[in-house]
Image (cartoon, coloured by chain):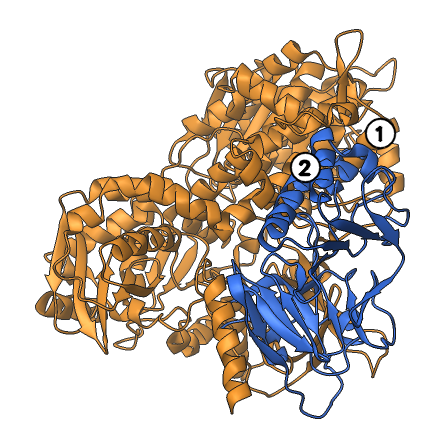
Chain colours: A orange, B blue
Amino acid sequence: MRGSTAMAGDDDDLPEPFGSWFASRGWSPRPHQLAMVDKARRGRHALLIAPTGGGKTLAGFLPSLIEIAQRPAPNTPRGIHTLYISPLKALAVDVERNLMAPIQQMGLKISAESRTGDTGVARRQRQRIKPPDILLTTPEQLALFCAWEGARLFFEDLRCIILDEIHAVWPSKRGDLLALGLARVAKFAPAARRVGLSATVEDPGIIRRWLSPTDGEDVDLVRGTGGAPPVVEMLLSEGRVPWAGHTAQHAMPEVYDQIRRARTALVFVNTRFQAEFAFQELWRLNEDNLPIALHHGSLSAEQRRRVEAAMARGELRAVVCTSTLDLGVDWGDVDLVIQLASPKGASRMVQRIGRANHRLDEASHALFVPANRFEMLECQAAREAIAENAFDPEQPRAGALDVLAQHIMGCACSEPFDLVALHDEINSAGPYRELSWENYESVVDFVATGGYALRTYDRFARIVKGTDGLWRARNPEMVLRHRLNIGAIVSPERLNVRLAGHRNGPPGRKIGEVEEGYLEMLEMGDTFIFAGQVWRLQGVTGMDVLVTAAPGEEAKLPSWGGSKFALSTFLAAKVRTMMSDDTTWAALPLDVREWLEIQRDRSLIPGREQMLLETFPRGHRNFLVCYPFEGRLAHTTLCMLLTRRLERAGVGPLGFVCNDYALAVWALKPMDGLDFADLFAEDMLGDDLEAWLAESPMMKSAFKGCALISGLIERRFPKLQKSGRQVIFSTDLIYDVLRRHQPDHLLLRCARNDAAEGLIDVARLGQMLSRIRGRILHSRLDHLSPFSVSVILEIGRQRSPGGAGEMILAEAEEDLIAEAIS
Amino acid sequence: MRAPAAPVYRYDFADHARGGLRLRVREVEIVCRAAGALWVEAQGVLIVADLHLEKGSAFAVHGQMLPPYDTRETLGRLEAEVAALSPRLLVFLGDSFHDKGGEDRLAAGDVARIETLALGRTLLWLAGNHDPAAPRALPGDVAEVFAIAGLDLVHEPTAEPGGLEIAGHLHPCAKVRGKAASVRRRCFVTDGERVILPAFGAYAGGLNIRDAAVVKLMRRKPLAAVLGSGRVHAIGWGSLAVD
């Protein structure tokens, strides 16, 4: 919560004691803070877009503080005045602390309290009976409020809803749930204003429309002043940046040196394995014993909180972290942000860089550390984008129907609803503006009886229509079960990593949690790195992974999954442009230039809109390598579809690998003579895609997510908590049965959308196929090209992308037969 | 978790018609079928375990609307087995229904299908822990345990089998490790003295056979007969992973 010393603004607009409070701190209010006060006075919804460190949170709260301070004493106790919603629990708690400072300094009689999943029962109950003036909470808590009988009364006095970090929330299922919650609260408190706080984005119009109860015109845009432009550099490990790889191991001594020279550094990486690896490497070099910590999503919550607290106290010199620290509480002391390996997108990088130096007038410092030559191109493109203040464009999204199902059940738990009125209400939520009556009705039918063509469940319906024509939950058990399962975050099942007990004794201390599948490729007795230490896997019992410490041993490294974030379309286009024009190469680091020149001499450099495709023999196999630059997800899908076609073309494809830039397929027969225009024709997104998708593990995983969110399957039961591993049925089995008997079921449609959008990136693939139509540049070679090295080196390191089940069984059987014959 | 050490034991197995796996245990020849049923050809006996019929509706009663198609799916696979083998005796090894009310919730069409299955053969229903009472209205005989041709048929494996025991109850599953990934499938598991059948029901979950509950029943490192698509694969203990 800061004002500014830099700007001498006009603070006539601020009433007392606010004006003198600013003055007493030696600050004057920023223009955007005054603008937000002005919007509030005129009763307008507002979206504030400002870079980090611009006093954004105070700008959001200032109008409410003024309004509450100025209102007359109440005759009867009042309800909540302002509801603040943050995507992070920690942020809600942190903002509570920061908000209390000005309130106390000005001697205001305003109560502000946080409420998250961690808040104790007593405090939660008190908050319902005697609500604070300002309540700080999360989207999940809002959904819980909406499913509560007292919701209407509770929100009656609400005047303002503040949505923080809105850029991070809206394009997700959590965002859908939040938008539906907003629409509901607007029915209870029509006078409540909406205030969005967002980091800088390419197109604020999308967020305005999302936030608005109508079409976006009623949400005013307020822009904060831009700070000093960030200083972004690329680490040029002269001549030593490898041609392939993701670890940036070559650069660790230089990274360590940078940390030593900074006050506090955040070291961002793209995956958890990478975080563990970098942490290990840095400590190997840490002769000065600098306090360097680790933070990623597989560590236990308490462990992460300890790191955050130490950071807040200024006790750490560096934290190696994943996207878990992309958002979060304000750490003024960070003066350097290091991005290890590919930045993936310009917007994400700007957010990450914003984590350094939360003082507007000073420039943030960031250092890109590319792990291979392609990443050097990518880092350079990201630097240019940041300098030009250009961001990755985003698409508006249609609200998910599984989330809608959860919301409708919640509404029924709160109070009886009228079918038509609820449809109107849902249509007022941004992502559901286009929701048709047919889709709405089928979701209501799903909520009631599962939406099956075979109508045997009518007598068990979860919601029923009363004689008054209103729909309500059938009985209190349905209500209780629903409330236990609210939320739109589906994370993989997690296992506890614990020290093994003595002999058959109980397991010991918990070290952290890993996602199911994290340790899949390890055998009993293998060593692995976790939480910065080396452990030996001793066994798995129920929900516990048992380990013993194995200090000093060489850890077996699991395969690098690469990043789950694809290179943004925007950045990919920049990279292609940069590469295609050799007059601009002079601006590139020497390593990259040399590498591009060798590629030009040995093979070809594609034009801006072209796609390079190389064919060459290697070993006893024939390779096809191409460079769409569309990210690993889209490439994996493309490989699946290409191999189906190559199979039909009779060349006998044997396998494939891909990374963010390229993909490689190898086959028994040469592929030089194929009709590539035909091979890459857009119609592959028709039947081939559907046939492959239906059987793919991606569909099953998407179905599981939809089944959990929609309430088809419950995560938690009253009284006992069943974990996924003990769940008495598997969603894969349900998927198979449903697909055979009712292939057009609502949840299968939801899963298809999710898989196409998030897991296989079909839209991106479609754009790419249309872009390269007639623009495939074929280079026929005798041996591999410089570009192809990065993807060829992935062979043998990657997991086979599903669908290989029968092959695994056959191989294991051969082993047994060989053993039997020996 | 390792199976107790034992002298080297050679399992006697070979491929059988239609993707099945022929297994000789204690001089008795049995066939593990890719659908998950056990076929004793010499006696014309087909054995299935843990059908958990009406599991979907059992959950729907409590508000979890699982697709109501599990019973017809399971019966469909059973009909295919019966049509292929024409057994004279069809044994349900217990937990044929997911709960006590299951039989009453059967759709009329599904009752008729079970009645058709009983034409020209005997159905034998063993009690399970989910369905301790025998079916009331469905055709067939009822027993707690049963023995035929040197085979003891039980729902739950006993602590110490006397002869060759055929049991269900545990829903065995194998996680088979490949070079770069693994696959989890239902399986038969045997140590040469008893055979535990995979669950036959569409919604029945699975227990990894490296779990202590299975390992403690095995006299030696067991052999897994893993259900692939249209084929049963014999997989050794060394290729199996925990979950």
Looking at the image, the residue that sits furthest to the top is A468
**Residue type indicated by callout 2:** Leu
Quadrant position of residue A479: top right
**Residue type indicated by callout 1:** Arg
The location of residue A546, given as percent across then percent down, is: 72, 74
The location of residue A343, given as percent across then percent down, is: 39, 56
Label drawn at residue A397: none
> Could you tell whether A490 is left or right of A627 in the image?
right
Q: Compared with residue A592, is residue A758 higher up or lower down, i.e. above or below? A: above
Labels 2 and 1: the sequence-earlier one: 1
Element assignment for label 1: helix
Q: Residue at x 78, y 24 (%)?
A: A459
> Could you tell whether A10 is left or right of A682 in the image?
right
Q: Which residue is label 1 attached to?
A: A128
> Could you tell whether A580 is left or right of A444 in the image?
left
Quadrant position of residue A763: top left
Looking at the image, which is closer to me, A651 or A42? A651
Q: Chain of mark 2?
A: A
Assess disc 1: are there few (<14), some (14-19) or many (≥20) residues with their C-alpha within 10 Å of its C-alpha: some
Q: Compared with residue B170, is residue A469 higher up or lower down, i.e. above or below? A: above
The location of residue A534, given as percent across then percent down, is: 61, 80
The location of residue A436, given as percent across then percent down, is: 51, 17
Q: Which residue is label 2 attached to?
A: A712
Looking at the image, which is closer to me, A693 or B34? B34
Q: Chain of mark 1?
A: A
Assess disc 2: are there few (<14), some (14-19) or many (≥20) residues with their C-alpha within 10 Å of its C-alpha: many
Looking at the image, the residue that sits furthest to the front is B120
Give the quadrant of the N terminus of chain A.
top right
